[in-house]
Image: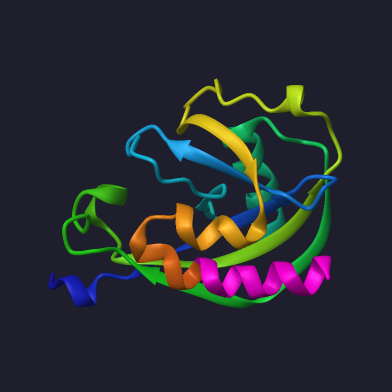
Amino acid sequence: MAIHQLPMRTGVGIIVLNKSNQVFVAKRKDNPCDKWQMPQGGVDKGEDFITAMRRELIEETSIKNIKILKEIQNMYRYELPDNLIGIIWKGKFRGQRQKWFITRFLGEDDEINLNTQHPEFIDWKWIEPQQLPEVIVDFKKELYLNLLKEINQVID
């Protein structure tokens, strides 16, 4: 199958804001350079977006204490760069279309634990929202610029 014929993976993404409106980002285990991302993941068969979002957040960060501030109406997409197609997601997808949520973290930082059953991240931090486009891998930059607009609507 040609690359452009591969389907898009359906996923969710989670914007986690702390009490100071800073955004949670983490460094991937499989890309330990100085690039950070927000939690995200696939939607399992039979799962709705909210259930998938809560499951992914717990699986990746152990975060349970959240309040959903906004379910973003748009489905955002990104395409993988050619060098990652065929490697990520067992070669089944060329990118993702994602439903994103903006959430408020209601817990304390010591609730955050990346040492989960299947760890994906090796480090995490809180950053100012406007830093998001600078910390993400290049192929997700446009996505993060769009998400920044969504965040600004919630926190302004």
**Residue at the left extreme, as displayed:** 2
Which contiguous range is marked in magenta? 144-156
Up the image or down, 54 lies above or below 94; here it is above
Q: Position of residue 17 (x, y in %)?
A: 75, 50
Residue that appears at 52% across and 66% down: 144
Q: Is residue 32 left or right of residue 120?
A: left
Q: Position of residue 129 (x, y in %)?
A: 65, 58
Q: Is any part of residue 48 visible from this angle?
A: no
Whether residue 80 appears in magenta in the rendering, the answer is no
Question: Which one is nearer the viewer's eye here, 66 or 21?
Answer: 21
Residue that appears at 24% across and 64% down: 81
Q: Quarter of the image containing the N terminus?
A: bottom left
Q: Is any part of residue 56 visible from this angle?
A: yes
Residue that appears at 17% across and 71% down: 3
Q: Is residue 30 left or right of residue 75?
A: left
Tell me which corner region of the image, top left, top right, bottom left or bottom right, holds residue 103.
bottom right
